[in-house]
Image (spheres, rainbow, N blue to C red):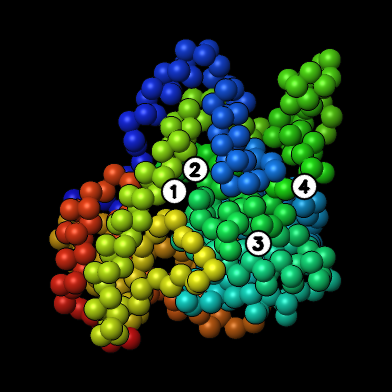
Amino acid sequence: MIDFNVAPFTGKETEYMQQAIANGKLCGDGPFTKKCSQWMKEHFESQHCLLTTSCTHALEMAAYLCDIQPGDEVIMPAYTFVSTADAFVLRGAKIVFVDINPKTMNLDENLIEEAITEKTRAIVPVHYAGVACAMDEIMAIARKHNLLVVEDAAQGVNAWYKGKALGTIGDFGCYSFHETKNYTMGEGGALLFQEDKYQEKAEILREKGTDRSKFFRGQVDKYTWVDYGSSYLPSDLNAAYLYAQLELFKEINDKRMAIWNLYNEAFASLEEKHLVERPFVPDYAVHNAHMYYLKLKNLETRTAFIRYMKENGVQCVFHYIPLHTATAGQKFGRFHGEDRYTTRESERLVRLPMYYNLDLAQAEQVAELVLKFPGYQEI
Ligand SMILES: *Cc1c(COP(=O)(O)O)cnc(C)c1O
């Protein structure tokens, strides 16, 4: 059986985790946590980077730092993971979903402006599959209407927009290091931001409402409870696992890219015959091979495809059920305008196995099976 995902492992993680144990520092903000955030600041040219327990938590921190109040509105696509919305719902926000661009599956920047009301406070672009949203247009709309931008770059670590790392363009950027993502620490994430004005509040929020970060830097004599906070810092053991992966980021990226390219070349002929649609990467984007998906004619074809692959020993999966169709989505949000693409495109998208430890021979095997699927219908 070829699984859809296996947590990436390079071999070096064990050594660094042993080092973390030997350091005798297992709580948060130890040496490996510092190395990880420093590495990201340098490679992604970010002024600030705080390692967190998940991307969900990074999003929660961002929603808090945006000072979202009950009744405020936040614009995002409905084709995303629940956490994108949950983080803002926790602060009492109303979620306003807009339709996606079917070519990229990212929110359609042309639909944002008409969804803005006097209650709108933030826009949350999600870089689906590590393919950048149209950030220049989104940032221009945000600045014109005085809105904040929180990039959900959970899938966009080491992916780029016009030379800038995803997650460093908006006011806040959120990364995921969950085991299904390109670089992992099991569960984990990071919050990135560029403006110094957020630093103190972010550190306090992350450290249970205390000024402990200042204390560690010797800026205060003792640390106390200074504001609202929670605990968003991961164990240094997890950071040790991640640091091994960040050091080998090029190797991990190259391997994923080789699989992605193998699939993409193999399916060109299917696309020419209008049996599938392959992912589209705009010229402005450098993606990170986070995901390889195909779009089939419709839900029925996709169901048959997933069954066929499974019968032949390959696990393929669909993705998000649009949030506005879920019980909580109806309670906490509304869809602005017409759902022309969100539901339709989500029903026909299928993801193929894609992970660092998948051999190219296995990827070849997957590709051959896909080519032989007997149930294609012309799109
Ligand atoms: C994975 C993912 C998340 C959540 O990440 P966690 O680290 O598991 O909290 C949020 N948004 C998107 C788009 C994701 O793909």
Q: Give the total of numbered labels.
A: 4
Going from the N terminus, do you reach mark 1 or mark 3 first? 3
Q: CB of residue at label 2: within 8 Å of ligand 1? A: yes
> In this view of the protein, which residue sits in the foreground, 33 or 69?
33
* Labelled pair 1, 2 in contact (Cβ < 8 Å): yes
Going from the N terminus, do you reach mark 3 or mark 4 first? 3
In the figure, is residue 208 to the left or right of 353?
right
* Residue at point 51%, 30% (across, down): 239
* Labelled pair 3, 2 in contact (Cβ < 8 Å): no
Mark 2 is on which residue type?
Phe
Query: Residue beneath label 2, please?
Result: 177
* Residue at point 38%, 22% (across, down): 15
Q: State which mark lies toward you, 3 or 4.
A: 4
Give the distance between the C-alpha atoms of the residues marked 3 and 4, in whole angstroms. 18 Å
Q: Residues within 10 Å of mark 2 (few under 14, many from 20)?
A: many
Q: Residue 108 appears in which quarter of the rendering?
A: bottom right
Q: State which mark lies toward you, 4 or 2.
A: 4
Quadrant in which the C terminus is drawn: bottom left
Query: Residue beneath label 4, please?
Result: 195
Give the distance between the C-alpha atoms of the residues marked 1 and 2, in whole angstroms. 6 Å
Q: Residues within 10 Å of mark 3 (few under 14, many from 20)?
A: many
Query: Residue beneath label 1, please?
Result: 181
Give the distance between the C-alpha atoms of the residues marked 1 and 3, in whole angstroms. 20 Å
